[in-house]
Amino acid sequence: ILSCLVTDTRTAEKHPSLIRPISVLSMTMDHLLGLLNRGYDDELLGLHNFLWDRMRAIRMDLRMQHIFNMQAVFMHEQMVRICLQKQL
C-alpha cells in the first residue's frame, strides 16, 4: 500500500513503475475497506489518517493515468461513503 507521498507527479515521472494499474488499485481499496470491518474502538480512530492518505494515493494514481471507467467511479463512491460515515 503506497502512501500519497510516493505517488506524487514528479516521482511518478521518474519512476513510472510506482504507478499502480487499476487491478492493483482495486485490490488496495478492498484491503482498506477490510480494515474497516472491525468494531469501533480506539485503534479504528487511529486508522483515519492512514486510510485518508492511502485513498488519496489511489485517487492520484487514477487521475495520473486518466482512468475514468466504472471501476474507478465505484472506488470513488466507496471513498465518499467512508468520508461521510466518519462525519456522522
Image: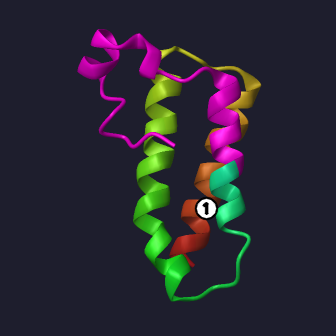
SS at circle 1: helix
Q: Quadrant of the C terminus?
A: bottom right
Q: Give the residue drawn at x 54%, y 62%.
A: 83
Q: Position of residue 51 (x, y in %)?
A: 50, 58
What amino acid is labelled 1 in the image? Answer: Ile
Q: Is 5 included in the stretch rendered in magenta?
A: yes
Q: Give the residue drawn at x 31%, y 11%.
A: 13
The answer to which of 84 and 23 lies nearer the viewer is 23
Q: Is residue 50 placed above or below 78 in the rendered structure?
A: below
Read off the magenta span: 1-30
Q: Position of residue 62 (x, y in %)?
A: 53, 25
In the image: residue 83, left or right of residue 4: right
Q: Is residue 84 placed above or below 41 in the rendered structure?
A: above
Q: How would you classify the magenta stretch by its main secondary structure?
A: helix
Q: Position of residue 65 (x, y in %)?
A: 51, 14
In the image: residue 46, left or right of residue 37: left
In the image: residue 21, left or right of residue 13: right
Q: Give the residue drawn at x 54%, y 72%.
A: 86
Q: Position of residue 44 (x, y in %)?
A: 55, 78
Quadrant of the rendered structure where residue 6 is? top left
Q: Residue furthest bottom?
A: 41
Colouring: rainbow
Quadrant of the rendered structure where residue 20 is? top right
The answer to which of 67 and 34 lies nearer the viewer is 34
The answer to which of 39 and 62 lies nearer the viewer is 39
Residue marked by disc 1: 82
Q: Is residue 35 placed above or below 45 in the rendered structure?
A: above
The answer to which of 1 and 87 lies nearer the viewer is 1
What crowding class fits label 1: few (fewer than 14 Cα within 10 Å), some (14-19), or many (20 or more)? some
Q: Give the residue drawn at x 41%, y 51%.
A: 53
Q: Is 38 included in the stretch rendered in magenta?
A: no
